[in-house]
Amino acid sequence: MTDQIVSILAATVTAGTPILYAALGELIIERAGIINLGVEGIMLIGAVTGFIVSVVFDNSWLGLLAAMVAGGLITSIHAFLTITLRANQVVSGLALTLFGTGLSGYLGKAYIGIPVTHPFAVQPLPLLKDIPVLGKVLFNHDILVYISFLLVPLLWMFMYRTRPGLLLRAIGENPAAADAIGAKVFVLRYVYVIMGGMLCGVGGAYLSLAYAPSWLENMTAGRGWIAVALVIFALWNPLRAMVGAYLFGGIDALGFHLQVLGVTISPFFLNMMPYLFTIIVLVMVMQRQGGRLTAPGALGIPYDREDR
């Protein structure tokens, strides 16, 4: 029984990693004051681009880099529409999801069924892997999981302990005030929106290069939407986002293991569990916050210097 629990916990970390990368990317974007509902489409573009480049050049690291670039490029469309043209951010994000879904399906059609020769394989960390329980749960994964372990505290320190992090929060809370002290609001918003898109691309690439090394149309299966909801659950805090990602990953992993153990539960219900859990968590967060969320003050509001 202990081995089964450890196995589920280890699978929880793996299943939560693509959601974590996407959630961190969305968190950065929203901290800059921009709503991005295109995470699902960005992840799909990252997944298909990373997979194609990895197959063509037989190099998964090159595929990961390509996924980051692709994620940043497609997100720059959203940045241009919402920052420069001040278009409706919700509409732009939804359009990005539809565009990314369609484009990824078209680009990846010829690559369905082709395996990745060198995916990101499990690389147990010396010494740490021998720690009872924790060794198998935390230190028996691929390198992208270990990078995510480092990324979360580094991002937290950047946001809450550095001057650039303070400016990031300022342009999301009160861009006019940030502009008044000399911050280049438009440039910074572009930078952080594109950076966030690159992380979303990594989340997609993790699916096609590590989690399930292959390409399937719509293989994100709603994880981008879960990442958007997770940012609200985390109250725009990277550490809480990490906890939330593993909670959602645990629900996903639990459903899979229940099927393996032969538990007689409808597979449709098991597939629905992560999304049902998402709704329940959002309701709980709203109740705890008294119906009001501590979102960045200027989130979703286009900034115009003439309005100062």
Image: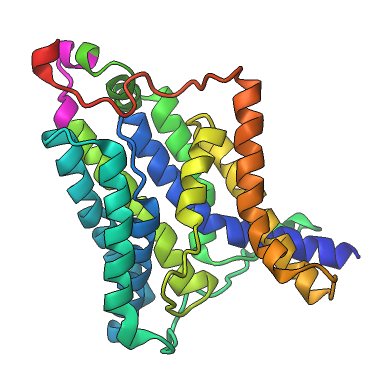
Horizontal and vertical percent position of residue 248 = 63, 51
Instruction: Based on the picture, tell me whether residue 185 belongs to the magenta stretch.
Output: yes
Q: Is residue 220 left or right of residue 137?
A: left
Image quarter of the N terminus: bottom right
Image quarter of the C terminus: top left
Horizontal and vertical percent position of residue 203 = 43, 58
> At 35% across and 58% down in the image, what residue appears?
41
**Looking at the rendering, which quadrant does residue 108 occupy?**
bottom left
Q: Is residue 275 left or right of residue 196?
A: right
Instruction: Return the residue nearer the eye: 177 or 268.
Output: 268
Q: Is residue 57 left or right of residue 272?
A: left
Instruction: Return the residue nearer the eye: 239 or 269.
Output: 269
15 is higher (above) or lower (below) than 177: below
Q: Is residue 148 left or right of residue 98?
A: right
Horizontal and vertical percent position of residue 272 = 65, 59
Regarding residue 138, the answer to whether it shows in the image is no
Q: Residue furthest right?
A: 1
Regarding residue 102, the answer to whether it shows in the image is yes
129 is higher (above) or lower (below) than 215: above
Q: Residue furthest left?
A: 306
Horizontal and vertical percent position of residue 60 = 38, 75
> At 51% across and 34% down in the image, what residue appears?
232
> What is the count of numbered marks?
0
**Looking at the rendering, which quadrant does residue 234 occupy?**
top right
> At 33% across and 42% down in the image, what residue appears?
36
**Looking at the rendering, which quadrant does residue 25 occupy?**
top left
> At 84% across and 76% down in the image, what residue appears?
262
The region drawn magenta spans 178-186
233 is higher (above) or lower (below) than 57: above
13 is higher (above) or lower (below) than 244: below
Instruction: Based on the picture, tell me whether residue 137 belongs to the magenta stretch.
Output: no
